[in-house]
Amino acid sequence: MAQNQHAAIVSAYERTVQPHMARGDNKAAAPAIQALVNRYGGQAVEEALESLVMHYDLKNL
């Protein structure tokens, strides 16, 4: 995956999904996640979010 696409997915996730997840509102987050998948493809979104989680986990060790 291109780095700019990865950055775009992470940025969109942080803008559109993360606020709902922070409030524990998974139902509201679902359409935003689906929109990311529709725009970028499931594999690209999965890879970008796995990378984001790994970065977060390593940063907080």
Image (cartoon, grey):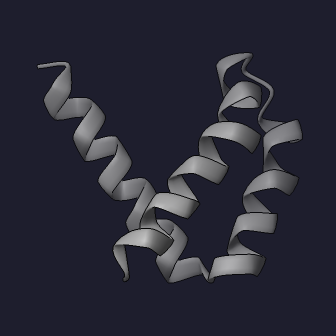
Q: In which quadrant of the rendered image does the C terminus lie?
A: top left
- Residue nearest the viewer, comparing 14 with 37: 14
Q: Is residue 56 above or below residue 35?
A: above
User: In the visual, does 5 lie left or right of 36?
Assistant: left
Corner quadrant of residue 56: top left
User: In the visual, does 56 lie left or right of 11?
Assistant: left
Q: Answer yes or no: is residue 38 visible.
A: yes
Q: Position of residue 20 (x, y in %)?
A: 77, 29
Q: Is residue 51 above or below residue 27?
A: below
Q: Position of residue 19 (x, y in %)?
A: 72, 26
Count up the numbered dots. 0
Q: Is residue 51 above or below residue 36?
A: above
User: In the visual, does 23 lie left or right of 10?
Assistant: right
Q: Identify which residue is drawn at 36% across, 47% down.
A: 52
Q: Identify which residue is drawn at 34% across, 43% down.
A: 53
Q: Identify which residue is drawn at 69% across, 73% down.
A: 37
Q: Answer yes or no: is residue 17 visible.
A: no
Corner quadrant of residue 6: bottom left
- Residue nearest the viewer, comparing 61 with 11: 11
Q: In which quadrant of the rendered image does the N terminus lie?
A: bottom left
Q: Is residue 23 above or below residue 57?
A: above
Q: Position of residue 41 (x, y in %)?
A: 62, 83
Q: Identify which residue is drawn at 49% across, 77% down.
A: 44
> Furthest residue to the front?
4
